[in-house]
Image (cartoon, grey):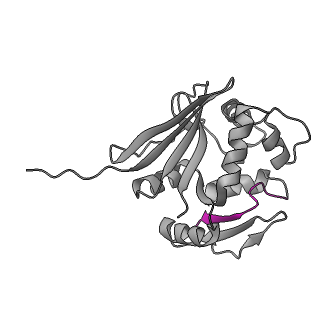
Amino acid sequence: MSKVFFSVSVSLDGYLAPPGMDLAHVGDPTFEDWASQWSKLQSWIFPTRFFRERLKLGEGGETGTDDDLVAQTFARTGVSIMGKRMFDAGEAMWPEEAPFHTPVFVLTSQVREPWVRPGGTTFHFVNDGIESALRQARAAAGDRDIRIAGGADVIQQYLRAGLVDELALAISPVLFGGGRRLFDTIGREVEVELVETIASPRTTHVRYACGLRAASTAF
């Protein structure tokens, strides 16, 4: 069966997004501040050859550890699941050929027909919750894995439901001091086990197996 996983960048103090991250403020100083911080968070991935090719940013780019891990993540992903807020941001920023090249299931209250993009990406809009999205994703994934793309709230919902098999973090050397924490609503109910640690010159990659902690029995 396909594994369910997420793979995201986080700041050293545990934030997935900097304070004030909101596309509504494009062009004002608030946007410039969070965009600068977010760029620092993602600075390990922008120079990689695979990422540049995937987003049609031009030829060239770095090879090595970071590039290999980005390529492996996309290669294993047969389907992605994301929230409406992440989709809205991506719809405004992705190139016409969205970078997924797979089905994508968007959790939303909006009723909308599937949105087909060049290159094999089709966005499907799911109105009846995370488990419905996951059932549809499993049917579409084939022998590849299912990635919970984000944002933080969607990742937390899947973690609390015990539906995530694996998580991967790229811990960037930046401190936000605020923003959206990745594990803000997650407590001791989620149990993790370290699988792998890989350091690169730009970030530290860690991968964990995870699941819900077994309930203890009181006597």
Q: Position of residue 140 (x, y in %)?
A: 63, 70
For this view, does 219 lie left or right of residue 208? left
> In front here: 118 or 49?
49
| Residue at figure coordinates x 62%, y 64% from the top left | 143
| 28 lies above or below 139 | above
Residue found at x 83% / y 42% = 52
- Residue 216: where, in percent of width, then height? 20, 50
User: At which x and y percent is residue 37?
Assistant: 67, 31
Q: Is residue 177 shown to the viewer in this render?
A: yes
- State the count of labels: 0
Q: Position of residue 38 (x, y in %)?
A: 68, 35
The residue segment tinted magenta is: 97-108
Residue extending furthest toward the left: 219
Among the 4 quarters of the image, the one containing residue 8 = top right
Q: Is residue 18 left or right of residue 219?
A: right
Residue 97 or residue 143, whichever sits in front? 143
Residue 42, relative to residue 142: is it above or below?
A: above
Q: Residue at x 59, y 66 (%)?
A: 108
Q: Is residue 146 left or right of residue 62?
A: left
Q: Is residue 83 visible?
A: no
Picture quarter containing residue 10? top right
Q: Is 107 in the magenta? A: yes
Q: Does the magenta-highlighted stretch encompass residue 95?
A: no
The outermost residue toward the right is 59
